[in-house]
Image (cartoon, coloured by chain):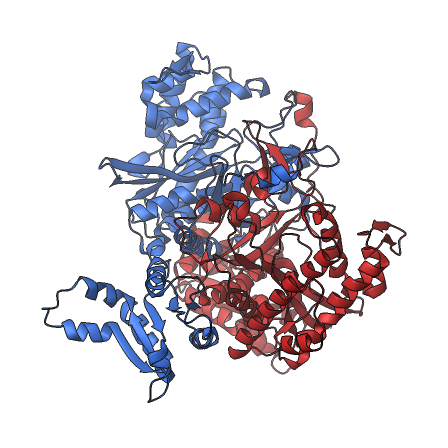
Chain colours: A blue, B red
Amino acid sequence: MTKEQKTALVTPELPRGLIDRQAADIAATEAMMAKIRAVYELYGFEAVETPFIEYTEALGKFLPDQDRPNEGVFSFKDDDERWLSLRYDLTAPLARYVAENYERLPKPYRSYRAGWVFRNEKPGPGRYRQFMQFDADTVGASSPAADAEICMMAADCLEALGIKRGDYVIKVNNRKVLDGVLEAIGLGGEENAGRRLVVLRAIDKLDRLGVAGVRALLGPGRKDDSGDFTKGAGLSSDQATQVLNRIAFGVRSDVGGRGGTMVIGNATSQGDLPLGHDLGIQGISELAEIERLVRVSGYGDDRIRIDPSVVRGLEYYTGPVFEAELTFETPGEDGKPIRFGSVGGGGRYDGLVARFRGEKVPATGFSIGVSRLLAALRAIKSPIVGAALKAGPVVVVALDRKDHMADYQRLVSELRNAGIAAELYLGEGGMNAQLKYADRRGSLCAVIQGSNERDAPSGRQVVIRDLVLGAELAKASKDRADYLELRQRAQQTVPEAELVARVRDVLDRHRG
Amino acid sequence: MTKEQKTALVTPELPRGLIDRQAADIAATEAMMAKIRAVYELYGFEAVETPFIEYTEALGKFLPDQDRPNEGVFSFKDDDERWLSLRYDLTAPLARYVAENYERLPKPYRSYRAGWVFRNEKPGPGRYRQFMQFDADTVGASSPAADAEICMMAADCLEALGIKRGDYVIKVNNRKVLDGVLEAIGLGGEENAGRRLVVLRAIDKLDRLGVAGVRALLGPGRKDDSGDFTKGAGLSSDQATQVLNRIAFGVRSDVGGRGGTMVIGNATSQGDLPLGHDLGIQGISELAEIERLVRVSGYGDDRIRIDPSVVRGLEYYTGPVFEAELTFETPGEDGKPIRFGSVGGGGRYDGLVARFRGEKVPATGFSIGVSRLLAALRAIKSPIVGAALKAGPVVVVALDRKDHMADYQRLVSELRNAGIAAELYLGEGGMNAQLKYADRRGSLCAVIQGSNERDAPSGRQVVIRDLVLGAELAKASKDRADYLELRQRAQQTVPEAELVARVRDVLDRHRG
């Protein structure tokens, strides 16, 4: 580096789509995660974590005809020229982990993990290139009981976070129902994987685009309001109708819905079988079993509900799929109601471990989108995230820094030894700047020792200042009946020996 | 992707230098970090986190003559062709953060953060390419009181983790003392930055290589036992002597050491001033102030000690430097004693924020190496990390999976509703496999309901099996006096209504 380059200033900025996290955010996230973790552990899931970097190949999205693999993924070459990538979710690394440790692990293997994942995509509002997921997965259990358990756990998580019954729903569907239809209209097989994915993503947008929008995406494509054209799956009008009829609407009546009873028998007797019915019947029967298990555990259809419009946009699901949706609305900043919608989802992915082991290994899991859920908890003013941030530390004002730093330091140490968060002001400011600093830190109390207090005839004293009452006092009228009392409580001079006790009084006063 | 590639199996493996973390490790780390966090907060530090990815330029190690920047760092290009890197420590991103948010932040700004950092280096035993640091920094305070506070906080952290007084020491030195000498022997200025770094790293190895080894590294270089040659700083024999005399040994007596009194006055009167003495005197006077402040707060030289051999291998330090060292030894696996040595370190880096802002911004901080500290806590059998891992969940055995999954599911739900971690066995195994599974999970209790229990004339019953006593029973002689009592406690048949109460009995029995 030349001297010139060294002296040129660097702009302090983050690459787009990345953000710093402040104390309030971190504390709220921690509090939220602790609640989720407790539910996961109640269900017998144990923690496991994989590193952020994996072989690109292990993540399973290798595109060999590109100079840089993995559009959408951050990738770089290792010394031995093998491609590495930052993980883009927590499921692909789990599949690698299970395959690598297969013999050693208890099976079924229930595990959970929270972690940051990375997408090399165009960021947008609320859409980042680094974000956190909190996953739970059961590997080695093909039973619908494993899927049912995941759904109940998701519901329990939301309630543990203070989201009221009726304000959320776990929607359940089964890819097999859809896959049966797709097979029947000639979209089966490896060679149609890409088109199937387009179909899935189209159906996934039913809520937002409505039937006409989805139909366009199933067919030639769709031009959105801005004029951008999205290429469709290229289904014929007849094929698109079959998909829409049988999946997005038809199945709803087949599998019970609101009433809560599974009616596969009825569907059969009505001759109302879905297309591709072997796979479809299997899917419906799994849904029936899931519904039965959650109902017997006391989860009504206000909490867990079969919903044929749920598809999930990922290709790797092979059976039941889940979506955790918040159904309440809150007024946004502009007054318009905001609906948070999906805050998590998952499903069964029996083929993911097979990439490594050849044989299929059944697996099902659920992933919570941490920031979106946090935003929702904030919107409903959840005490869990609200109470997470503590008040600032007690600030010991440093007035005569040349000669008395050791005195101030001693006061701070005394407070800390008593378990009270405290700090010595370490800047260059005067009295006012220091009190302003304490204010900025959200401190409740300041401790002051000037020469008057130090040299008091009755022995060393300290001033204990209640910053909350102090602020009140500053705004109060002197005519107020309790003005003098307020003033006295807002600032007291006490013997140094009472430092800890009096500071504690102030803190207790404002900690409810 | 062709069909052929899809069916070819992928080897499930991690890139070298990366590891997965198991539940015990995660729980122990969490418990340890919670203790550290509490100490940091007691000192008034608040949490802040930056993302994993930064502009390479912002991290400050850009090497423009390389095709790929930052040897030692994982880097990749963004869409707009700018280089991005994974952070290699938490200090460089903090400098960027402070510079970017300078006006908004309270000053001095005390903050802490834990996070994974990445090094694209050759991994070795205990040396990974992803590892965790836990940092605390004060930005905007030039006072030695800020450095003193960091040292006390480091000592408090170690004691909070159960490391006894006398088993650790926080060593303190000042780069200015060394920089003064280097300037005096003609190694000042930007053009000698590289050589100064070689000198620093040589001195940093004093413990390991002894005086002769360091002297070789200060001079032409050194061949190690394996025959590998490390190029030295190229100092003349005279220059090397001056460095060694004045720094590694000479200053020790100047600034007090064991006795705990600073004797700058004495040093002056003895004409024993370090070379380059303007900077050197300033450094010694700062050390004296740090020592005074920590002593008045009750930290003796068994906890915080001036030690002239501490240099820290990083170039950016500009004043006091700290090293947290564990001084006890534990027997290693081969019986040979292991000394953990440094588990953290830091120092003052007044120039790091200046890269962004032009003006110097004083800053000092400390970084804990999380895994090394965890290994040390394990070695001393610290209850903090030992107690972190909980027992496995209660396992409800699933015998008749065709017809009675709903019954089992109901039992599990009942336990969970009572706040007891429980799970339904979801695999395909029989009774023995299920009990083996419970054993593998570290479960204390299993619940069994076969047809006998289900159809009992007196109403539904369940078998509560104490897995710990069960294991004891399996090994016990039948002649044992309390054998029958043991057998009864190890497995009881009780009415279903007593499920929760009896399971709780078993859990309480083994939770001390």
Residue B161, percent from left and from top: 57, 70
On the question of residue B391 being in view, the answer is no
On the question of residue B108 being in view, the answer is yes
Q: From this viewpoint, which residue is outermost toward the bottom?
A: A458
- Residue A455 placement, left or right of A316: left
Please tell me which residue lies in front, B81 or A299: B81
Please tell me which residue lies in front, A302 or B220: B220
Q: Tell me what residue is drawn at x 29 percent, y 66 percent.
A: A467
Please tell me which residue lies in front, B252 or B179: B179
Vertical placement of A414 versus A304: above or below? below
Please tell me which residue lies in front, A391 or A354: A391
Vertical placement of A379 versus B512: above or below? above
Residue B260, percent from left and from top: 63, 79
Residue B249, percent from left and from top: 75, 70
The C terminus of chain A: image quadrant: bottom left
Vertical placement of B82 versus B463: above or below? above
The N terminus of chain A: image quadrant: top right
Residue A208, percent from left and from top: 33, 26
- Residue A75 placement, left or right of A275: right
- Which quarter of the figure has residue A73? top right
Q: Tell me what residue is drawn at x 16 percent, y 74 percent.
A: A484
- Residue A126 placement, left or right of B83: left
Q: Tell me what residue is drawn at x 53 percent, y 61 percent.
A: B33
- Which quarter of the figure has residue A499? bottom left
Number of on-image labels: 0
Vertical placement of A280 versus B93: above or below? above
